Image (cartoon, grey):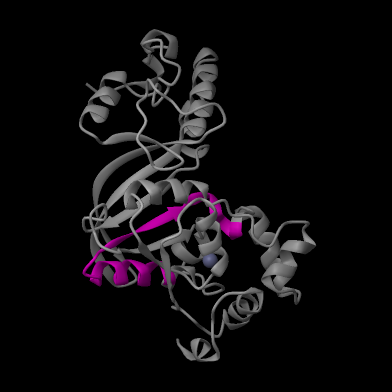
């Protein structure tokens, strides 16, 4: 029988009294229970340690819910592979949506579905091979870029970098994973502000100057969720990270991920994005003149 979230029991009715029983209360609680029993719905803390729904993290700690694995055959820019997809979301995001859902239900529920569809930051893990046992697997932590990843814009090299990461991980004997960070659009400033920076860039500013003109930081990406997921999947084992950005290595190290070997990752250099890449190099990315000759 299809489940109607509008008929869902209020959270208090399905709670067993534990303070963190809020995962998916807008979904059928029986389905949630089954997914937990099958190991397809897991909750972890910031160090990747599984926590039961009855035993949440201390106040102020992050908890991340992971739904998967879900087989996903992908075909991206000529790269064809099958990955296991895990959708991941912070408990606080779910709690916000649940509160919103309760409120909207009380008012008739008309806006519930658009609220569910648009208001949560859901990150993704795309896993190739047995990454939880692999020796020194290959990892890409990829910041979402609608214009590059989806529209194929060449103002940046994100789309080719994503496809090349999937190809390299798929071809690597150790396998690995892409962590796709949905809240990282425009290095963390969001899509609307990114559009404004593009207009400023066309007036002569580089990618960092344009952020500063808007009063925004050069890079405001938060890697704490990526770190928790890496703790969970890697369990303290060393891994290789596809990146040219030393700050990403430093950010992950600050969350306790120290056994990380950077692996250069250059793809999609074009006449459209050479200036953008030069700005990244001047900012600290490990790119050489030869890298700019690739296309
Ligand atoms: Zn991009």
Residue 36 point in image, percent of width and height: 27, 29
Can residue 115 be seen here? no
The structure residue drawn at horizontal position 52% and vertical position 74%, both measured from the top left corner, is: 154
Q: Quadrant of the C terminus?
A: bottom left
Relative to 132, residue 6 above or below: above
The structure residue drawn at horizontal position 40% and vertical position 26%, both measured from the top left corner, is: 23
Chief SS of the magenta region? helix
Q: Quadrant of residue 159?
A: bottom left
Q: Residue furthest top?
A: 13
Relative to 272, residue 59 above or below: above
Residue 242 is inside the magenta segment: no
Is residue 4 toward the left or the right of residue 192 in the image?
A: left
Number of marks in picture: 0
Is residue 196 toward the left or the right of residue 174 in the image?
A: right
The structure residue drawn at horizontal position 31% and vertical position 72%, both measured from the top left corner, is: 168
Q: Which residues are magenta?
A: 161-187
Question: In this orientation, which residue lies closer to the viewer: 247 or 135?
Answer: 135
Relative to 195, residue 209 above or below: below
The structure residue drawn at horizontal position 73% and vertical position 56%, both measured from the top left corner, is: 216
Is residue 77 toward the left or the right of residue 197 in the image?
A: left
Q: Quadrant of the N terminus?
A: top left
Residue 184 is inside the magenta segment: yes
Residue 39 point in image, percent of width and height: 24, 34
Residue 280 point in image, percent of width and height: 61, 75
Can residue 127 be seen here? yes
Question: In this orientation, which residue lies closer to the viewer: 126 or 148?
Answer: 126
Q: Quadrant of residue 22?
A: top left
């Amino acid at each position: 029988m299809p489940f109607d979230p509008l008929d869902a029991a209020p959270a208090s009715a399905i709670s067993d009294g534990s303070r963190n029983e809020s995962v998916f209360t807008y979904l059928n609680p029986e389905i949630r229970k089954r997914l937990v029993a099958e190991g397809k719905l897991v909750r972890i803390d910031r160090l990747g340690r599984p926590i039961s729904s009855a035993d949440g993290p201390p106040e102020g700690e992050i908890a991340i819910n992971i739904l998967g694995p879900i087989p996903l055959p992908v075909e991206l820019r000529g790269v064809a592979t099958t990955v296991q997809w895990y959708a991941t979301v912070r408990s606080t995001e779910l709690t916000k949506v649940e509160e919103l859902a309760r409120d909207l239900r009380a008012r008739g529920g008309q806006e519930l579905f658009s609220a569910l569809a648009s208001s949560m930051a859901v990150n993704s893990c795309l896993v190739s091979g047995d990454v939880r046992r692999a020796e020194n697997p290959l990892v890409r932590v990829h910041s979402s870029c609608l214009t590059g990843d989806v529209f194929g814009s060449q103002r940046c090299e994100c789309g080719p970098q994503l496809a090349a990461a999937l190809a390299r991980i798929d071809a690597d004997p150790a396998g690995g994973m892409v962590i796709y960070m949905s809240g990282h659009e425009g290095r963390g400033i969001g899509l609307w502000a990114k559009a404004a920076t593009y207009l400023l860039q066309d007036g002569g500013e580089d990618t960092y100057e344009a952020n500063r003109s808007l009063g925004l930081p050069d890079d405001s990406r938060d890697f704490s969720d990526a770190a928790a997921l890496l703790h969970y999947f890697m369990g303290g084992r060393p891994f290789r990270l596809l990146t040219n950005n030393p700050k990403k290595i430093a950010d992950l190290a600050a969350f306790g991920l120290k056994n990380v070997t950077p692996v250069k990752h250059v793809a999609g250099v074009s006449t459209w994005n050479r200036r953008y890449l030069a700005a990244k190099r001047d900012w600290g990315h490990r790119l050489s003149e030869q890298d700019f000759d690739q296309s």
